[in-house]
Amino acid sequence: MAGGQSCSVLVTGCNRGIGLELVKCFLKKPNPPKVVFATCRDPEGARAKDLKILASKHPNLAILQLETTDEESVKAAAKKAEACLGGSGLNLLINNAGVMPPCTLQSATAKDMLEVYNTNLVGPMLVTKAFLPLLKKAACASQQKDMSCGKAAVINMSTILASIEKTPELYFFMPVVSYRCSKAALNMLTKCQSMGYKEDGILCAALHPGWVKTELGSEQADLTVEESVSGIMNVLCNLSEKHHGSLVTWEGNTLPW
């Protein structure tokens, strides 16, 4: 990571797709984090099989039960992480968990819209609030003056589909109105976090992973999970204060809000 290696990382939504690949890449680094926290809704379920296999091979991987929309679950996960860190802080939080159901202007309902907002916006807000004391502790303990993912950072997984400026050319790309709206709200949350946590030295940015071949994406997508996450890992290494409060692509380019 720029400005130093992250000693601790937490990624939400790790049982598949981008989250799982991020965990694999952190573990495979030549100098991996001392602890990687991988969260999922049901660590004992069949969908967590790959995570458990990884944990059996990597003692620095800790699997945490965490339902991002359940405040008690989030608080419990934060307590477990704090105990595992043994007095150290959390350097990097990646809010990756999200949903993208089909949704058009005609099919959208209040219930559907609120459920997507709950996962894609409220979830990252609750998780960041719960882990904020650990992020502040890491930032305070760091010898680095400048912001980086090696010091303390919150990365919210967003999308180019939430860019209001890009909407005219991308509108018919995918019928996912609730997803677009929720991620646009997440972008605003990221901007607010960047202002609210600046004095604490915590870097805050939103990240567009590209159109990826996952359950959330599509088999027609441009990128494999490996290609996307390889780019994301490079971006994380180079994020700095100039990216604070911005939306960055997996290739390192800044997108308009």
Image (cartoon, grey):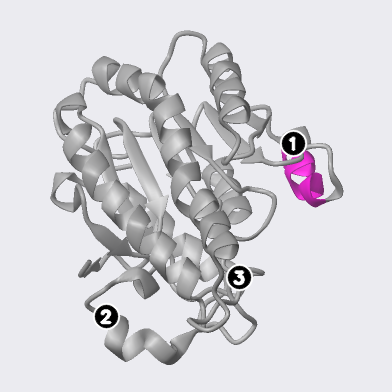
Q: Up-down: is 219 above or below 28?
A: below
Assign a secondary structure to mark 2. Answer: loop
CA gap between label 1 and label 2 equals 43 Å
Assign a secondary structure to mark 1. Answer: helix
Mark carried by residue 57: 1
Q: Up-down: is 125 above or below 97?
A: above
x and y, in percent, of residue 185 in the image? 34, 57
x and y, in percent, of residue 76 in the image? 61, 21
Quarter placement of the C terminus? bottom left
Q: Which residues are magenta?
A: 47-54
In front of the other: 150 or 164: 164
Residue carrying label 3: 101
Circle 1: residue type? Lys
Instruction: State the residue lying farthest toward the front.
Output: 110
x and y, in percent, of residue 140 in the image? 25, 17
Residue carrying label 2: 166
CA gap between label 2 and label 3 equals 21 Å
Circle 3: residue type? Pro
Q: Residues within 10 Å of mark 3 (few under 14, many from 20)?
A: some
Q: Main secondary structure of the magenta part?
A: helix
